[in-house]
Amino acid sequence: MLIESAPAQVTVSPLGHLLLAGSWEFATLKSKSIVLPNATPDAESVIVIDATKLDFIDGTGAWILQNCLQRLRQQGKQIRLEGWTASNLKLMQQIEQQQSVKLPTKAAIPLLNQIGMNAAAQYKSGFALLSFIGQVAMALVANLSHRSRWRWAIVCNNVQSAGVDALAIIGITSCLLGVVVAYQGVDQLRHYGANIFVVDLIGYSMLREFSPLITAIIIAGRSSSAFAAQIGTMKIMEELDGMRTIGIDPINMLVLPKLIALMLVLPLLTVFSDMAGVVGGMVMARSQLDISFNEFLTRFALVIHPTSFLIGVGKALVFSVVITLIGCFQGLATKGDADSVGQQTTRSVVQSIFIVISLDAVFSVVFSLLGM
């Protein structure tokens, strides 16, 4: 049979003391608001808390009571405890000590300091990236004369995951992009009777700009994030330390196979994207401008120079190096726990896409100045 605890009570004795009664615990206080009555006249500065009739008090009750007493102390009152057992008195003292401890506050950092700290962090990160690129270049040169060091099985596995598995999404995206370019071009060229020039528009835009760029962005989202997550997880699981212990360089085992695989895959995916984009534009030109497939392909072969195709493939080769190095670098920069893996994976995708788009803009300006 359960015995119900008496509710917490506060009364005033004839001597003006505050008498605590009942059980001051979570079960009896969770739905009750405790307010201490006025025990003494304003002239009195000492308030006596009598616990003679107190049945039980736990941490919750002691915390609530100390909050009430704290407000009295702020009013200039002095508190004296009487009739308290040794254990209850110790509990009250512990709660009072905890309440007197001030939580540390984070000092506000001035704006100029924040800018300087961010600049220093970016400089440090950039220097670390350049160091990593140098290590990869040295490992690549060292392995050129030792064919036995190449791990072709890992390279083929990365070709499968980064290339073959991405064919569907790249094909659909490029085809739809070709449809969009053709549709926008058709809407403008139709007014001037220059329907046939839609072939030039689709060919140059897809081969030089859109195909390498959209392919690199998709691969950055798929592969760069996968590289960072894989290497980052291996680092927090201390697998990289285990590899170094048995004499295996993580760059040779993890970075170089990914770099070689993506350098092979991304140009080929760009060619596939070129074909898908041209097919989408060709279908749109046939449906909107009545340009037959034969007429489209004949015009395409006459006006589109191989230079445009080679420029797009060359861009893809540069983009593959950027995507691989950024993804692997962010994976190796992982620290601490699984939360760091997510942060570095996000950074790898954002930085890869940003650098790819920036390089594409630089290429456009340089090729324009060179007349290409």
Image (cartoon, helix red, strand yellow):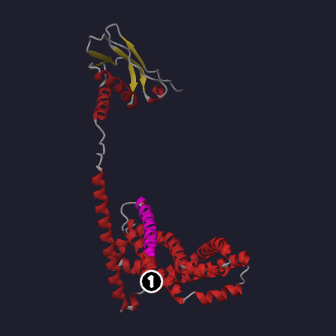
- Classified by dominant secondary structure, the portion drawn in magenta counts as helix
Amino acid found under the numbered disc labelled 1: Ile
Tell me if mark 1 has few (under 14), some (14-19) or many (20+) residues whose alpha carbon lies within 10 angstroms of its own: some
Q: Is residue 315 above or below residue 357?
A: below
Residue 361 placed where, x, y %?
A: 45, 73
Residue at 54%, 73% in the rendered image:
214
Q: Secondary structure at mark 1?
A: helix
Q: In the depicted view, which residue is nearer to us: 346 or 17?
A: 346
**The residue positioned farthest toward the top in the image shown:** 14
> Residue under circle 1?
260
User: In this orientation, does residue 260 appear?
Assistant: yes
Q: In the depicted view, which residue is nearer to us: 269 or 274?
A: 274
- Quarter of the image for the N terminus: give it: top right
Q: Is residue 30 magenta?
A: no
In terms of image quadrants, where is residue 228?
A: bottom left
Q: In the depicted view, which residue is nearer to us: 27 or 177?
A: 177
Residue at 49%, 84% in the rendered image:
311
Q: Is residue 361 left or right of residue 272?
A: left
In terms of image quadrants, where is residue 64?
A: top left
Question: Which residues, given as a range, are shown in magenta?
Answer: 339-361
Residue 200 placed where, x, y %?
A: 60, 82
In terms of image quadrants, where is residue 322?
A: bottom left
Q: Is residue 21 left or right of residue 4?
A: left
Q: In the depicted view, which residue is nearer to us: 39 or 10?
A: 39
Residue 262 placed where, x, y %?
A: 48, 80
